[in-house]
Image (tube, rainbow, N blue to C red):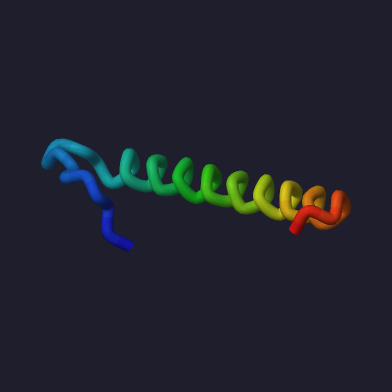
Amino acid sequence: MTLPVALPATITRREIRGLLREELLALDNIQRNRSIFHSAEQLAGTS
């Protein structure tokens, strides 16, 4: 996985790990919301 932004040299490993964890949690939430939305669409018969 490549990060689109150049990280400043002063950033610490702990900060990187925290950022990655937030990123993964955000992606997880997005995927969960998508599947809920998809299920709702199927129930409504619009898909």
Which residue is pictured at 84% across the width and 55% down the height?
Answer: 45
**Relative image position of residue 19 (x, y in whole percent):** 38, 41
Side of 4 relative to 23 (left or right): left
Side of 44 relative to 35 (left or right): right
Locate the C terminus by quadrant: bottom right
Which residue is pictured at 61% across the width and 45% down the height?
Answer: 29
Residue nearest the observer in this picture, 40 or 9: 40
**Relative image position of residue 35 (x, y in whole percent):** 71, 54
- The residue lying furthest to the bottom in this view is 1
**Relative image position of residue 18 (x, y in whole percent):** 41, 41
Above or below, 1 relative to 25: below
Residue nearest the observer in this picture, 33 or 20: 33
**Relative image position of residue 22 (x, y in whole percent):** 47, 41
Locate the N terminus by quadrant: bottom left
Side of 28 relative to 7 (left or right): right
Which residue is pictured at 18% across the width and 43% down the height?
Answer: 7
Side of 7 relative to 40 (left or right): left
**Number of numbered callouts drawn:** 0
Which residue is pictured at 53% across the width and 49% down the height?
Answer: 27
- The residue lying furthest to the left in this view is 9
- The residue lying furthest to the right in this view is 43
